[in-house]
Image (cartoon, rainbow, N blue to C red):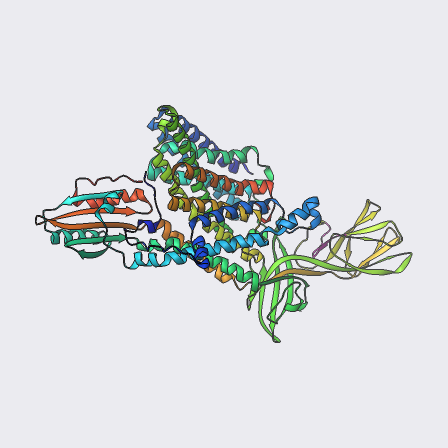
Amino acid sequence: MSKNKEDLDMLPEGAKQEQEPQTGFVDRLWNIFSSMKLGLFLLLVIAITSIAGTIIPQKRMPQDYGSLYPLYSALGLTDMYASWWFVTLLFLLAMNLFICSFNRMTPLWNLFAKPKAKVSEGYLTRLDHHLTHQSTKNQEGLCQQVKEDWQGRGYRVVEEKLDGKVFLHGDKGRYGIWGSFITHVSLLVILFGAVLGIYFGTEGRIAAEVGRTFSLHEVYELTPDEDFKVRVDDFKTIYRDDGSVDAWVSTLTVIDEGQEVLTEEIRVNHPLNYKGYKFYQSFYGSYIPLRVASPGSPEGVEVTVTERDFVPVPGTNLGVWVAQYIPDFDPNLGWVSKSPDPNNPRIIYVLYRGNQQIGIGAATIGEPEILVGGEGAVTFLDYKPYTGLSVRKDPGVGIVWLGCGLMILGLSLSFYVPHRRIWAIIEEKDGKGHFTMGGHAQKNKIAFVKEFEDIATPYARKAEGSGTS
Amino acid sequence: MGFEENLLFYLTFAAYGIASLLYISYVGTKNAVTAKVAFYIVVFGVVVNTAAMLLRGYIGGYVPLSNGYEFLLAFSWGIAFVYLVTEWKYKVPITGAFVIPIAWLLLAYVAILMPVEYKVARPLMPALQSNWLTYHVITAQFGYGAFAFSFGAGIMYLIKERAINLGIKSGLAAKLPSLETLDQLGYRLIAVGFPLLSLCIITGAIWAEYAWGRYWSWDPKETWSLITWLVYAVYLHARFTYGWRGKKAAILAIIGFIAVLFTFFGVNYFLSGLHSYA
């Protein structure tokens, strides 16, 4: 089995650039980054260290890590993928990709645009596929025959004449040459897009009840560079017949410079996009202001809670667990709403004495619920559902998608457009044409065996050394 | 799960099981008829596997690629389908003994270990209602099928090579295809699987962008798919630059598929993240 070398090593002798030994610091650095070994080493190190970040929970509170926290924190393992050393690894990989791609550009271009036809006979006979042939035609006739033959098979033919010899080079699938180059560049493009997102992107969250208008500056953790407002017109949960959630839907109106510009329904997987800011349906909840009174405090106290909160009744051992809002309450259906529309809105609550459940009720909004014959009273004053929105701006995302597209293009060229090359050296011996021919395929060698046999058929009973490697 | 769904599932399970046994016996007997029969049983398996998926889609009213049971049906389908295509193209029936059992074992896991609540058709939660999810899973099923085959070829390579080194001229090893063929097959299948895995990761990223506004969040399943991608990337580079063929390549192909299985199973059982519903 012969060792298989890189594309560039398969260039005919003399086509490779002789590297002058470099001594300057920059040159030496350049050479280190030109090495494929470094690239492979980085890929492996990134793969292995990535495992650590999947095993150790990321971005948790210090107490979640227990006594190991100081160690993890020092090594950056609590937010590993953003740690200085992991980012450095990615940066080194990007440098390596860039320099390797840069170095390959010129030789690849030469191979693509102006392949050299001149090779030595020794080079051809060392190839996996080769044959020699003595023709009955003269050199010119043989030359013509070979050229037409190759072109008829879809090969691009380049010819050089030197010292009475004719050198022919044919190739097919030359766009495949660019496959791996484009794939490597695509990774750089993706990394670049990701960096743009990290440095110029911003994200935040807001819980906004129906009817509220908020400006971008009110969104928690968002650092906006635009200044428009968004009004929440509606928020509803759509249930299926079996009670499972089909969708959460918010209706949002964008107000820019006092003008209503657009109104859109958003749901999970369908965000709204305005001026590069995307609004995602992310979470939901409700604010329930209520007054709780007891004989000891007849005025009562007002608190704002949300569903599944617990409210103690002051001065007693009673407590109210605020269970769930039901928009269209039907006593026969209990916890399941008859429809999503607020035809009979109720708030279901559970009454506790100590930790004993002693009753259950469905309160009408605004009407006091008298508890256990007057030991206390609770009035649900309002029910204000809010929609939870994630707001994001990521100027790099388009570049990331461009990179993904390039990657698919590069991989397709790489794997499905095999570059095949054939050479012939045609001489005149005793007035007759004589040639040595060789062929080489970088990929899909199995298919090339057949291909080369077909090419060789007119000139030989069988091609020599048609083994694969 | 209803009677029809169970029937189709167990028919699929039985078909892959019987085909596995036939292929394994073929290793012993080299009887061409056995291989032919096994091949057609796998064809039957793929047909009922398809029917099981279609019925699930019909019952659930959604594209049936959204919970553990549905993924495994898709995964086994991918392996069997890739096997049939490869066998039809390259004519190496003996590989069936190393590839079809993987599909069978996946379904055995469903039959024996999977809790019933992971099997039933459940209405899709809002995050799963996306066409990108469909593309994401389809590319995964074909890609993983191809990787499963290259894994089988890698195992065969190691068995064969060890026998040659020990000078064993008979038995199982002698019946396996040449080292050359196994090495090439392993590579061809990775050449199919790698672009598909890339597409799988990309479609997953697009889906995440629509659903959560983040194309990449380093959640364990995402990260493991990247680790898998890196292993196969190393395989390809080592092959084309350093001429890593044969044993080293076979070992990398095996490691790659172990990473695939960990992405698929391990993450859900050992780690937590966004993909916990799948």
Residue A204 occupies quadrant: bottom right
Quarter of the image containing the N terminus of chain A? top left
Q: Is residue B113 left or right of residue A209?
A: left
Instruction: State the image coordinates of residue A408 (x, y, percent, origin top left).
Output: 42, 54
The answer to whether residue B177 is visible is: yes
In the picture as drawn, the residue positioned furthest to the left comes out as A431
Q: Is residue A4 left or right of residue B107?
A: left
In the picture as drawn, the residue positioned furthest to the bottom comes out as A258
The answer to whether residue A244 is visible is: no
Q: How many marks?
A: 0
Q: Residue at x 51, y 37 (%)?
A: B4
Q: Is residue A154 left or right of residue A216?
A: left
Q: Is residue A314 left or right of residue A90?
A: right
In the rendered structure, does residue A196 fall within the stretch colored magenta? Answer: no
Instruction: State the image coordinates of residue A180 (x, y, percent, origin top left).
Output: 39, 53
Front position in the image: A315 or A438: A438
Q: Is residue B73 above or below residue A206?
A: above
Q: Is residue B63 above or below residue B43?
A: below
In the rendered structure, does residue A324 fall within the stretch colored magenta? Answer: yes
Instruction: State the image coordinates of residue B198 (x, y, percent, origin top left).
Output: 46, 50
Q: Residue at x 73, y 51 (%)?
A: A331
Front position in the image: B189 or B7: B189
Front position in the image: B17 or B265: B265
Residue B193 occupies quadrant: top left
Q: Residue at x 33, y 45 (%)?
A: A444
Quarter of the image containing the C terminus of chain A? top left
Instruction: State the image coordinates of residue A366 (x, y, percent, origin top left).
Output: 79, 61
In the picture as drawn, the residue positioned furthest to the front comes out as A23
Query: In the rendered structure, which segment of residues is drawn in magenta?
Result: A322-331
